[in-house]
Every structure is written in structure tokens, then in C-alpha cells.
Image (tube, grey):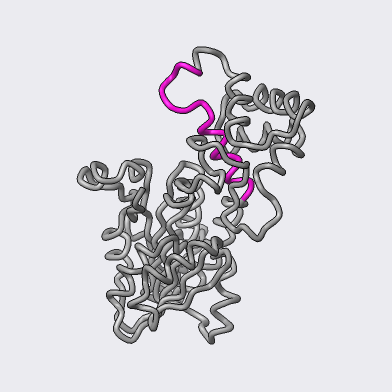
Amino acid sequence: MKHISVLLNESIDLLNVKEDGIYVDGTLGRGGHARKLISKLKNGHLYAFDKDATAIEESKTNLSDMLDKVTFIHDDFKNMAKHLEEFGIASVDGIMLDLGVSSPQFDDETRGFSYRFDARLDMRMDQSQKKDALLVINSYSVDELTHIFKEYGEERFAYPIAKAIEKARKDKVIETTYELVDVIKSALPSRILHKKGHPAKQCFQALRIEVNDELRSLEEGLDVAINLLNIGGRIAVISFHSLEDRIVKTQFKKYSTAPFVDPKLPLPVSQMEQASFQLVNKKPILASNEELEENNRAHSAKLRVLERIGE
């Protein structure tokens, strides 16, 4: 399936790209957002990060006509400050984050992200790391599995599923996506199995988040990214599920809220400390009907943008 970048025009337009600016794409993927951003640069430059080495190699091909304006970095975006410092960059004019797993990762049968294909349990975005889905499923305790299914997948039947996994792996290692799907199904009531949607969807999401440490990376990465912005610089973040969006919303609110001042203190407004950031859009931007018709994966996407307005 062709990868279509979600909320492409909205996200890049709201970055207010300056032609001589320094920008970061923290989640390069196959370079869709990067291409749109680079097309607005004249003397500017883009530093593009991705944990997936395959994504970087494919983006080098996809952006082959723009290579003089982009530097590729194979790492988690939470480490962007360290890498930028190596290039003499202390601050930037804008940052783009398109969170979660990309369509090519889902659609690659060998990567083990999807319950649609029978493959070895993997789910690593960075294939050089040791922890994969097979390790998690076969070594985590019932309590640990219950926690990730409940917290990261919001799965109502987290405990029965974890117990079923514990029982199944006593007989043999759970090696493939289809084997895991069968175990999950065995733990669910028939009324759930007959509901719309795949019964393993929430557990697979939870497992992917755990393998790639996605939520902690997001929390740490947002702090790093926001503090790199120049005055007038913006960060645009596209999230795809409520756990991600909640983190983005909370962080943006924290940075855009002025420090508390006791109303009893006789301070004029001019002397009160103001917030250094402001929300560009108070409510998240959603995909248009036209985009939804073209790209089903845009249904859950939410775009939030934050701008630095002071020191």
C-alpha cells in the first residue's frame, strides 16, 4: 500500500517555514512531510531523524533531488539536541513530529507489527535493539503483561489475556503474530469476538508501544524539542491515539500556561511573568472529509501546534 502522509498541508503550513530556517523532522518515515517542508527552503536546512534504518534508506531515495538540504540521523528524536549540537546547532525554527508506526512498517509482512500477516513477533522500529515483541510476550510476568495491555492498549480483558499467554507459553514459545492472535482470542468472551474490529488490535498496539518505549520517548522528546525552539519557532505534532494525544495536550498546556501569581500580591500585569509559548490551535486539527476518503488511516489523526513567543 502506498504511504500517504497524514495532515500534510495543514502541518507544514502551520510551521510557518522560513526559507533560511533550520528545521527538524523527528519522525522521518518515508519523507512525505520532509519533502513538503524542504520545498519551502531556499538556504535553510532540515535535520531528519528516524529510529528505523530502513525508513532512512528509503527516504534517501525518495528525497534524492533534495539531498543538499537534508541531513539524515538514525536515532530516536528524544536525542535530537545531542545530535544537533554536533552540527553546531543550538536552536531551531521548527520541528515536525508524525507519531506512531508508519504505513510501510504495518504493511511489511516481515516486521511483525500487524495481525493481518503471519510473521515472527518483532515490532521493533529500531531493528538494532534487543527487545522485541517475542521477548516481551514470552518473558514478562502476568502482572507486567496485564499492565501494558491495560495502560497502553486500554484492553478491558488484559488480565485474562495475560493469563492465557502464560498458560500457552508453558507448552511452547509463542513465536508468531497468528499464534498470539489465537491466544488472545481464546481469552475473550464470544460477544467480544463477534464485535466489529479485530479482537487483537488493542493488545498489538500495547505491545508495540512497550517494545519501542513510545510514550516515554514522546514525553522526553517533547521537552527536548520545545526547549530547542527559537522565538517564533513552532512545533507541530500529529498523534494517532488518545494516549499520545493526552501527552501532547498536557505538555503543550504546561508550556503555554503562565506561572501562578498569588492574586493578593499587588503586582501590575506588566510585571507578571508571562508564558513563553502559546497554542497555535486550541483544539486539535482533524483530517478533512476529502483526506478521509483518500486515506483511511487519517481517521484518528490529531494535529496540535505550539509556538515560542518569549525567552
* Front-most of residues 106 and 240: 106
**Residues rendered magenta in the picture:** 193-211
| Left/right of residue 263 with respect to residue 291 in the rendered view | right
Q: Is residue 272 left or right of residue 302?
A: right
The residue under the point 57% across, 64% down is 76
Position in image of residue 118 (x %, y %): 55, 36
User: Residue 214: x percent and y percent?
Assistant: 57, 52
Is 196 a magenta residue?
A: yes
Q: Residue furthest top?
A: 190
What secondary structure predominates along the stretch shown in magenta?
Answer: helix
Residue 230 visible in the displayed image = no
Outermost residue toward the left in this view: 290
Q: Position of residue 249 (x, y in %)?
A: 45, 51
Q: Is residue 257 above or below residue 190?
A: below
Query: Residue 145 appears in which quarter of the rendering?
Result: top right
Side of 261 relative to 124 (left or right):
left
Q: Residue at x 36, y 81 (%)?
A: 21
Q: Quadrant of residue 63?
A: bottom left
* Quarter-of-image position of residue 98: bottom left
